[in-house]
Amino acid sequence: MAIAVMTHAPTQPREIHLHRLSRTTQAAFADLMDEADRAADHLDLATYAKRHRTAIKLIGIRPPASRELAQCSCQNCYCTAVFDADKAHCYMDGPVEFVQCETCADEHRLTGDE
């Protein structure tokens, strides 16, 4: 008799929308991402990576392959998606960089030239 070995499919989402989380969790996530950005500004990549790992656990998202999160800051809609940074579409509007998730980039890709 053969025994089948089945692995369990990951149940965590690949993307999460912050507006669906509690305000406390949203605030904690924002603080972690701010700390990660400050660490990156000082080239403290170990702290940067640690803050992203903590944020991943906090919001319950499946750890992305890049181990780095991005948050949609699309100017064309109100999107609060947090997702794998490798899947981000980035564009400049003047001196400011904005990020679009895959859905926003598919539905209304912006280039900054609008």
Image (cartoon, rainbow, N blue to C red):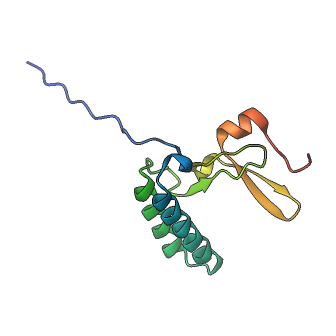
- In front: 107, or 77? 77
Give how far across and how far down residue 90 sits, in percent. Answer: 74, 52
Residue located farthest toward the top when viewing the structure as drawn: 1
Q: Which residue lies at the image location 92% right of the left edge and 48% below the top edge?
A: 113
Residue located farthest toward the front when viewing the structure as drawn: 23
Residue located farthest toward the left when viewing the structure as drawn: 1
Q: Which residue lies at the image location 54% right of the left edge and 69% below the top edge?
A: 31
91 w.r.t. 9: above or below: below
Q: How many numbered marks are there?
A: 0
53 w.r.t. 108: above or below: below
61 left or right, relative to 40: left
8 left or right, relative to 102: left
Q: Which residue lies at the image location 45% right of the left edge and 56% below the top edge?
A: 56
Give how far across and how far down residue 21 sits, in percent. Answer: 48, 50
- In front: 54, or 63? 54
Name the quadrant of the N terminus. top left
Name the quadrant of the C terminus. top right
Give how far across and how far down residue 105 sits, in percent. Answer: 73, 39
57 w.r.t. 87: above or below: below
Residue located farthest toward the right when viewing the structure as drawn: 113
- The answer to which quarter of the image holds residue 40 is bottom right
Q: Which residue lies at the image location 61% right of the left edge and 78% below the top edge?
A: 43
Give how far across and how far down residue 16 sits, in percent. Answer: 52, 45
